[in-house]
Image (cartoon, grey):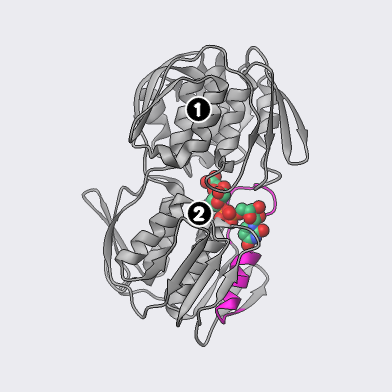
């Protein structure tokens, strides 16, 4: 059992190299998608994070065999049993909802608990359910259990009111075995959706347009196995780049796809951060005093909401005022009171944080209320003098592979 506390003694400069792990949000869609396969799937570069461990347990609850062979996760779904997913594991994370689309697609029936995940304010799943209904499914919600069933799934044109990542993925999963063509309009364009689509296509699916706002899925009857390497985690990369801008003395962040984080890189340049951007790495040079900037979160390729909390800590010490406007999760500001405990000057308005730059942050006892809040607090703790204790660190271990080891290797004083 991992400790639920991270202690950081700040004020140290970080230097050297850090290698980014594979994408959490791609892995958490890809693992449930294996339910659609009739043969063994081998996944390389699966990140060692708690969300992945929980999804593996959920696969095992479905009688799917999961083993690790050398560097690969070998998943054999041939003995799958479509049981009701009602264990605690379902409510430990958001991505358990991908079993809805995957099991509905494969068996035309799924019954499971409502998903959990970080508390970022309301996180409805109406668009997922409307998508399933458009394909011909009936949804019944009884207490915390959702039951979705269909005699058959038939492709349809589905317009998403919002370009939701989860709804796009769930509809793709369910539509893979639907009769005829499904078209998702106003689809989300996040790179993790492209990664999932390329894996499903290797398995024999007919999905086109992933990464654009219109995705078509021509239904097939069966998916075979495949071997797949998961893309690097753009949010982990962004977090370490922000950290390097905050307390780096020359840090190279490796295994990065810079095109996935263009909005972040251009914001950091606007702040005055000097970076050398390679084809698969970013070297962050030591920075002088940085300037405050305005950040507005948007769907991809805009500024990622998942990097809004980490960059808040950097903006807390930047010169002048910065405004963060959150358009995806209006209440994703639980990190701000924690930063204020450390001496930041932040005013909260509806959907906005106005950050007035200060000259220093102090150590404090703070709480990681959610995953990216935790990442932001780590950056703030590295910037602060003295020892900061971050409680509820389990949120951080959900999504950052080997974070303590990576921080130590860069020279951070962390335990
Ligand atoms: N929305 C609806 N109805 C729906 C679905 C979404 O109104 O049926 C709204 C949400 O309430 C929210 C917005 O649409 O305001 C965005 O939701 P989306 O479905 O795009 O996000 P998600 O699938 O719940 C994924 C990531 C999040 C990331 C968002 C946005 C996973 C497991 N989660 O969530 O990642 O913030 O996309 O990019 O992939 C994280 O990694 O820390 C994290 C929270």
Q: Which residue is mark 2?
A: 189
Mark 1 Cα-neighbour bin, 10 Å: few <14, some 14–19, many ≥20: many
User: On the rendered structure, is 69 left or right of 103?
Assistant: left
Query: Image quadrant for the N terminus?
Result: top left
Q: Which residue occupies the extreme bottom position in the image? A: 151
Residue drawn 42% across the image and 63% down it? 32
User: On the rendered structure, is 244 left or right of 363?
Assistant: left
Residue 85 visible: no
Residue 401 location, x and y as percent?
Answer: 40, 39
Residue drawn 54% across the image and 60% down it? 187
- Mark 2 or mark 1, earlier in chain: 2
Q: Which residues are magenta?
A: 115-138
Q: Which residue occupies the extreme left position in the image? A: 70
Q: Which mark is residue 242?
A: 1
Query: Image quadrant for the C terminus?
Result: top left
Q: Is residue 116 magenta?
A: yes
Residue drawn 45% across the image and 83% down it? 179
Q: Which mark's residue is nearer the viewer, 2 or 1? A: 2
Mark 2 Cα-neighbour bin, 10 Å: few <14, some 14–19, many ≥20: many
Residue 345 visible: yes
User: On the rendered structure, is 334 left or right of 259?
Assistant: right
How far apart are labels 2 and 1 at the CA level? Answer: 24 Å
């Amino acid at each position: 059992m991992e400790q639920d506390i991270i202690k950081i003694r700040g004020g140290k400069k970080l230097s050297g190299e850090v290698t980014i792990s594979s994408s959490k949000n791609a892995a958490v869609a890809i693992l449930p998608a294996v339910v659609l396969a009739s043969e063994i799937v081998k996944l390389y570069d699966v990140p060692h994070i708690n969300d992945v461990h929980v999804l593996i347990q959920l696969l095992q609850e479905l009688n799917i065999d999961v083993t690790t062979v050398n560097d690969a996760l070998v998943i054999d779904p041939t003995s799958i049993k479509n049981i009701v997913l009602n264990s605690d594991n379902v409510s430990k994370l958001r991505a358990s909802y991908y079993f809805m689309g995957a099991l509905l697609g494969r068996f035309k029936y799924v019954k499971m608990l409502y998903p959990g995940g970080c508390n970022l304010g309301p996180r409805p799943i109406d668009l997922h359910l409307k998508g399933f209904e458009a394909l011909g499914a009936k949804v019944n919600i009884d207490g915390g259990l959702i039951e979705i069933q269909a005699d058959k799934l038939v492709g349809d044109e589905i317009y998403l009111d919002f370009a939701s990542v989860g709804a796009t993925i769930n509809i793709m999963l369910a539509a893979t075995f639907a009769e005829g063509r499904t078209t998702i309009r106003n689809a989300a364009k996040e790179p993790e959706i492209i990664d999932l689509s390329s894996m499903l296509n290797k398995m024999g699916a007919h999905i086109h347009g992933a990464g654009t706002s219109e995705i078509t899925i021509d239904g097939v009857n069966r998916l075979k196995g495949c071997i797949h390497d998961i893309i690097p985690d753009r949010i982990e990369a962004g977090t370490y780049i922000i950290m390097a801008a905050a307390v780096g003395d020359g840090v190279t962040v490796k295994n990065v796809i810079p095109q996935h984080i263009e909005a972040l890189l251009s914001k950091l340049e606007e702040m005055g951060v000097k970076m050398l951007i390679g084809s698969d790495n970013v070297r962050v040079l030591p920075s002088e005093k940085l300037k405050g900037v305005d950040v507005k979160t948007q769907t991809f390729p805009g500024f990622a909401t998942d990097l809004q909390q980490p960059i808040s800590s950097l903006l807390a010490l930047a010169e002048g005022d910065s405004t963060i406007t959150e358009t995806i999760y209006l209440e994703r500001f639980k990190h701000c009171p924690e930063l204020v405990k450390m001496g930041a000057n932040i005013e909260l308005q509806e959907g906005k944080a106005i950050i007035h730059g200060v000259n220093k942050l102090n150590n404090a006892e703070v709480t990681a209320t959610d995953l990216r809040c935790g990442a932001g607090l780590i950056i703030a703790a590295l910037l602060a003098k003295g020892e900061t204790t971050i409680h509820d660190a389990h949120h951080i271990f959900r999504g950052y592979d080997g974070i303590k080891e990576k921080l130590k290797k860069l020279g951070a004083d962390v335990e």
